[in-house]
């Protein structure tokens, strides 16, 4: 029963994960010489942004679940591992299932960079919150 309670608080992260899976495995329009909205490197920025938002949503769910803003290294490790598993899963799907998409190490690297940026934001905000609540 406790696991379902955790999932309740992680609903936004779960929804965002499904959105990431769909968007990363959609067939993209073939370039016809004009990139239009998409520019060189757009894919990498999208991966970075997707995983930054995912990381923030995972921390948001965890904070709401525990009803406080405690800083724990285990939480950071779990969030990073979830990001690694999702990132690797997407690239494996692109490699073996959705072969019209290309699996790239650079995409996975941008996934991890986005996740680390989210961790950095969490740590920075935690430290800021901690220091502001312990003023003399």
Image: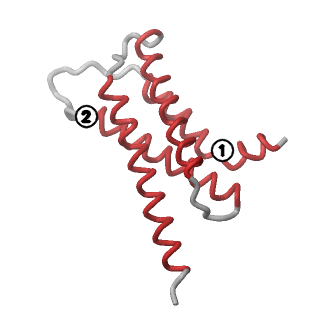
Secondary structure of the residue carrying tag 2 is loop
Residue beneath disc 1: 11
Return the disc, 2 or 1, that comes first in the chain's sequence.
Answer: 1
Residue under the point 34% across and 32% down: 109
Closer to the camera, 60 or 29? 60
Residue under the point 47% across and 10% down: 97
Asked if residue 115 lies left or right of residue 29, the reply is right
Closer to the camera, 56 or 133? 133
Asked if residue 14 lies left or right of residue 26, the reply is right
Residue under the point 30% across and 39% down: 45
x, y (%) of residue 84? 48, 32
In space, the residues marked 2 and 1 are separated at their CA atoms by 30 Å
Asked if residue 13 lies left or right of residue 93, the reply is right
x, y (%) of residue 63? 63, 58
* Disc sitting over residue 38 in the figure: 2
Q: Give the position of the N terminus as an image quadrant.
A: top right
x, y (%) of residue 131? 49, 76
x, y (%) of residue 93? 47, 16
Above or below residue 126? Residue 52 is: above
Closer to the camera, 133 or 61? 133
Q: Residue furthest right?
A: 1
- The label nearer to you, 2 versus 1, is 1
Q: Are marks 2 and 1 in contact (CB under 8 Å)?
A: no
């Amino acid at each position: 029963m406790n696991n379902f309670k955790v999932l309740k608080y992680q609903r936004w992260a779960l929804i965002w994960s499904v959105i990431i899976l769909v968007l990363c495995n959609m067939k993209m329009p073939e370039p016809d010489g004009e990139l239009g909205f998409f520019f060189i490197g757009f894919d990498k920025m999208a991966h970075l942004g997707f995983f930054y938002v995912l990381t923030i949503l995972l921390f948001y769910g965890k904070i709401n679940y525990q009803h406080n803003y405690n800083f724990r290294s285990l939480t950071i490790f779990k969030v990073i591992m979830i990001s690694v598993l999702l990132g690797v899963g997407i690239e494996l799907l692109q490699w073996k299932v959705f072969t019209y998409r290309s699996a790239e190490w650079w995409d996975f690297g941008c996934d991890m960079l986005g996740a680390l940026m989210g961790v950095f934001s969490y740590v920075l905000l935690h430290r800021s919150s901690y220091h502001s609540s312990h003023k003399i």
